[in-house]
């Protein structure tokens, strides 16, 4: 449990990565009450410094006693590191907000999107899991619809940015694009196929049921966060040559009929959601506009004419902000409120 303090000692584990960088920026922008910031990464980053609130902070490597005196640790250094180090951190009295997939489905670890299930934070025992980026932006939109009309089934297709995979993937898209435009051969290191000017129906590993891990994260995490195992979800997750911002096409079947206007009104007052929906003026959410923003944008809201109670919509959010760093910092803010 977090003890009430004026200011907290905060750690970012994976500080040099795409998500870690965004975490540092988010803590600063939201004026999180930081007494001291400690930054951790791998041995490769030894000697590096990163800027926070105008001063340079040295990047450290993790050791058994690293977490002594740290109140809150935001982890984004991959599942392996979370598996090893989150319990070490929790044991030394630090509250961990973990961005990896390692602990998300563990029954006694809360999986939290503050707009949806902040109440689950009360049950934490030192580790709190941050959901997958694609799931987070979807559940902030599903929650008000579920409360009003009970969702029976969701069919989702994602169009995910390369920054979700990390820094090396962003470099790969840039390099392949410049190589192709200069008639040079390309190299595929991060993804199994060319990502520039292409779409890959493959995110994370393939599982025995033919789905990818990313698809099954959306299925399972949605039920856990919404606290309702009866919601049926099926997903197809696709990598697209976009640097930042995940787009998703949602088809939602509800128990009660909701008109497109009713859905628009509901979503307009939902926390963390902005309705951006005026197709007659070519207004709908775009990844390039949502990059750097905090909210999830919703447009193309329309009734599914093939079933009785169905809605289609298009949602976009910044995968590094609400999809990762911002959600983690919002969880930390809730913990401070509750302390
Ligand atoms: P990234 O750009 O590749 O950064 C990886 C970070 O992990 C770097 O800071 C790296 O340090 C650090 N790291 C690697 N090995 C380490 C070790 N042995 N000890 C300490 N630090 C180590 O990746 P990213 O996109 O920021 O993602 C990081 C992790 O966040 C992912 O693996 C995933 O678990 C999670 N994530 C979650 C979401 C979500 O959906 N919520 C989205 C994206 C990522 P060096 O620079 O020293 O190598
Ligand atoms: N493979 O945190 O590649 O479970 O976009 C998030 C993003 C795993 C995760 C990606 C991934 C996660 C990706």
Image (cartoon, rainbow, N blue to C red):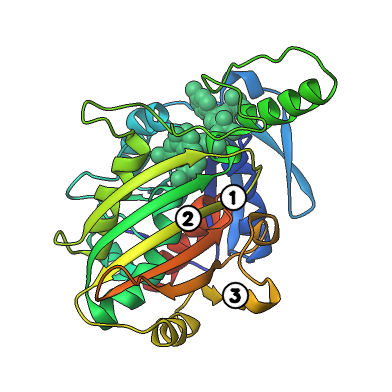
Q: Is residue 320 above or below residue 44?
A: below
How far across and how far down the image is residue 329, in percent? 51, 58
Q: Is residue 215 above or below residue 270?
A: above
Circle 1 crowding by C-alpha within 10 Å: few under 14, some 14–19, many from 20 = many
Quadrant observed for ligand 2 in the rendered image: top left
- Above or below, comparing residue 263 to residue 311 in the picture: below
- At x 61%, y 16%, the residue is 188
Of the pair 298 and 128, the residue shown nearer to us: 298
Q: CA distance from mark 2 to mark 3?
A: 14 Å
- Location of mark 2 (residue): 248
Disc with the residue nearer the chain's start (1 vs 3) = 1
Nearer to the camera, 285 or 222: 285
Label 2 neighbourhood size at 10 Å, few (<14), some (14-19), many (20+)? many
Confirm whether residue 73 shows in the render: no
Q: Are marks 1 and 3 in contact (CB under 8 Å)?
A: no
> In the image shown, does 277 or 245 lie closer to the viewer?
277
Q: Nearer the viewer, residue 269 or 235?
A: 235
Horizontal and vertical percent position of residue 180: 77, 22
On the image, the x and y values in percent for residue 44 come to: 63, 19
Q: Which mark is residue 289?
A: none
Element class at badge 2: strand
**Residue 230 shows in this picture:** yes
Task: Report the side of 221 relative to 255 (left or right).
Answer: right
Q: Which residue is under mark 3? A: 276
Which circle's residue, 1 or 2, is located before the other in the chain?
Answer: 1
**Quadrant of image for the C terminus:** bottom left
Please give the residue where the numbered disc 1 appears in the rendered image: 23
């Amino acid at each position: 449990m977090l003890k009430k303090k004026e200011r907290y000692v905060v750690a970012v584990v994976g500080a040099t990565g795409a998500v870690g960088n965004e975490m540092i920026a988010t803590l600063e922008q939201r004026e999180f009450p930081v007494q001291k910031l400690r930054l951790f990464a791998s041995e490769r980053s030894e000697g590096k410094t990163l800027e926070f609130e105008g001063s340079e902070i040295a990047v450290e490597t993790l050791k058994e006693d690293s977490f002594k005196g740290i109140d809150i640790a935001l982890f984004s250094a991959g599942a392996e590191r979370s598996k090893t180090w989150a319990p070490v951190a929790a044991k030394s009295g630090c509250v961990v907000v973990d961005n990896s997939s390692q602990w998300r489905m563990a029954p006694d670890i809360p999986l939290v999107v503050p707009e949806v299930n902040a109440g689950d934070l009360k049950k934490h025992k030192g580790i709190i899991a941050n959901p997958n980026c694609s799931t987070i932006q979807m559940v902030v939109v599903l929650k008000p619809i579920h409360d009003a009309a009970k969702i029976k089934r969701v069919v989702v297709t994602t169009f995910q940015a390369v920054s979700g995979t990390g820094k090396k993937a962003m470099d790969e898209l840039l390099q392949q694009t410049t190589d192709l435009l200069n008639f040079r051969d390309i190299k595929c290191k991060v993804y199994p196929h060319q990502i520039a000017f292409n779409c890959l129906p493959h995110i994370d590993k393939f599982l025995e049921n033919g789905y990818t891990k990313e698809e099954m994260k959306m299925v399972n995490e949605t039920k856990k966060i919404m606290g309702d195992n009866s919601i049926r979800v099926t997903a197809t997750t696709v990598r697209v040559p976009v640097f930042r911002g995940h787009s998703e096409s949602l088809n939602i079947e509800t128990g009660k009929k909701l008109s497109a206007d009713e859905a628009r009104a509901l979503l307009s007052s939902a926390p963390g959601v902005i309705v951006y929906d005026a197709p007659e003026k070519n207004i709908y959410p775009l990844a390039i506009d949502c990059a750097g923003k905090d909210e999830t944008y919703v447009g193309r809201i329309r009734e599914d004419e093939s079933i009785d109670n169905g809605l289609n919509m298009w949602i976009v959010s910044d995968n590094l902000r609400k999809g990762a760093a911002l959600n983690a910092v919002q969880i930390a803010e809730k913990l401070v409120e509750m302390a």
